[in-house]
């Protein structure tokens, strides 16, 4: 779509695990070295783990591409199968006929095949991707496959590739035997900020034009903060940016454009909703003060929908305070205590509204709903103060601490 405009041979940020685009960060280079060593030394199990989109499959495909004709390879990518289906898939990928055969026959023929390959000086490798989905039964089946060996060497080398949950699975007591057989283990770390920039330029260069676009100051920082250095999310963001720049007929990627694109991506996809409470909600007074003083450091860590829910929670809590006020029949002291909770709120809200308005002024009109919610809260505070004037010497209390003490991320 935009290749010609940016003088590119191909799209640089496609999501397919193309080995030609493999970027060897420090962590990826380490993983490649471990896998290469494990294969050359014919060690037993090798475990490769990494977050979703970290580049595990790309590394595996790059590894496969480098294997010569002295290797026999079986690849399993579907791990939500039965024990018999798993063995059948392994045999079929090795080129064996599996039609109409039971599990015992399949295992016998696999053993005969591996012995034959070993005798002919071929090395047999089994790669199981998405291994985090393996049940205990399937893991035990795979462990038993590793028992196929001669006096001097393993007949089958097994490489397990999966998400971080796989490591938690191996920590179970019943998998102690399996855990002890893992000879080499490597976890792919997310890219650093510097690696993120080089990763983007590397993919542009492989696609034909390293200078296709110009990233303005701060844009890489925003991309890194949102993607957390996960290659797949970097690709999604950058592909969206290329399309947006193409539509506007510019090669300049400004900070405003990057923030706008990321805001739209998060609203539409909610990539971090599983960690919303930790990363996106303002849960206490300290966070709110930070937002009021430096909104740019907080705003783009908050998904729009979570932000709206937070404001509604504020309104609901103010409503409950009002109910508490009218229900209280214990005298002036109790009423003063309730009013004290509101005494420090107006200044905080005014600062928050003013700075948030300045931060979101360049975003799409739909974000104005956020401001409207905040104005509604401010009006409530004004109404309370008009109806119940607060004395100047009223003791200040931790209003926002009380307000947000029990705020939790709503379930979607």
Image (tube, rainbow, N blue to C red):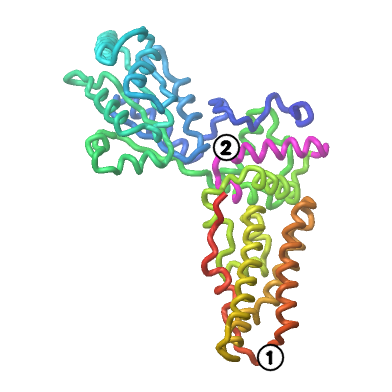
Where on the picture, by quarter, is residue 123?
Answer: top left
Callout 1: few (<14), some (14-19), or many (20+) C-alpha neighbours within 10 Å? few
Task: Give the residue displayed 74% in from the left and 67% down from the top.
Answer: 376
Indicate whether 167 appears above or below 148: below
Position in image of residue 116 (x %, y %): 27, 8
Q: Earlier in the sequence, mark 2 or mark 1?
A: 2
Residue at the (62%, 55%) spot, across then down: 306
- Residue 236: give its label: none
Residue 145: image quadrant is: top left
Residue range of the region highlighted in magenta in the rendering: 225-250
Taking the spot 30% from the left edge, 34% from the top edge, the residue there is 136
Q: In which quadrant is the N terminus drawn? A: top right
| Residue at which label 2 appears | 232
* Residue 247 highlighted magenta (yes or no): yes
Q: Is residue 274 magenta?
A: no
SS label for mark 1: loop
């Amino acid at each position: 779509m935009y290749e010609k405009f940016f003088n590119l041979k191909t799209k640089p940020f496609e999501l397919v695990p193309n080995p030609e685009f493999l970027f060897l960060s420090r962590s990826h280079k380490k993983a490649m070295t471990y896998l290469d060593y494990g294969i050359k030394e014919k060690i037993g199990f090798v475990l490769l783990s990494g977050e979703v989109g970290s580049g595990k499959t790309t590394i595996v495909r790059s590894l496969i591409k480098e294997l010569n004709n002295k290797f026999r390879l079986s690849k399993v990518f579907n791990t939500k199968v039965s024990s018999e289906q798993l063995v059948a898939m392994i045999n079929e990928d090795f080129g064996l006929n599996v039609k109409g055969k039971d599990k015992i026959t399949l295992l016998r023929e696999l053993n005969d095949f591996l012995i034959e390959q070993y005798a002919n000086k071929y090395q047999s490798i089994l790669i199981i991707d998405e291994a985090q989905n393996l049940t205990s039964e399937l893991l035990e089946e795979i462990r038993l496959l590793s028992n196929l060996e001669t006096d001097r060497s393993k007949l089958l080398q097994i490489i397990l590739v999966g998400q971080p949950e796989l490591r938690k699975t191996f920590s179970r007591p019943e998998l102690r035997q399996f855990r002890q057989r893992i000879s080499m283990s490597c976890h792919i770390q997310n890219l650093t900020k510097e690696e993120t920039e080089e990763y983007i330029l590397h993919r542009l260069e492989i696609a034909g034009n390293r200078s296709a676009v110009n990233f303005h100051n701060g844009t890489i920082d925003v991309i890194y903060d949102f993607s957390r250095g996960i290659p797949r999310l970097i690709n999604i963001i950058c592909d969206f940016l290329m399309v947006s720049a193409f539509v506007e007929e510019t090669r300049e990627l400004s900070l405003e454009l990057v923030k706008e694109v990321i805001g739209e991506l998060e609203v539409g996809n909610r990539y971090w909703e599983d960690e919303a409470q930790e990363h996106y909600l303002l849960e206490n007074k300290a966070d709110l003060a930070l937002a009021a003083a430096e909104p740019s450091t907080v705003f783009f860590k908050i998904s729009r929908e979570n932000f709206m829910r937070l404001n509604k929670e504020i309104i609901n809590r103010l409503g409950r305070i009002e109910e508490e006020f009218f229900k209280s029949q214990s005298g002036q002291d109790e009423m003063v205590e309730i009013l004290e909770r509101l005494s420090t709120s107006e200044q905080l809200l005014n600062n928050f509204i003013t700075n948030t308005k300045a931060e979101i002024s360049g975003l799409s009109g739909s974000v104005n709903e956020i401001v409207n919610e905040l104005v509604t809260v401010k009006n409530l505070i004004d109404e309370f103060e008009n109806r119940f004037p607060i004395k100047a010497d009223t003791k200040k209390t931790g209003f926002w601490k009380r307000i947000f003490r029990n705020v939790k991320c709503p379930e979607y």
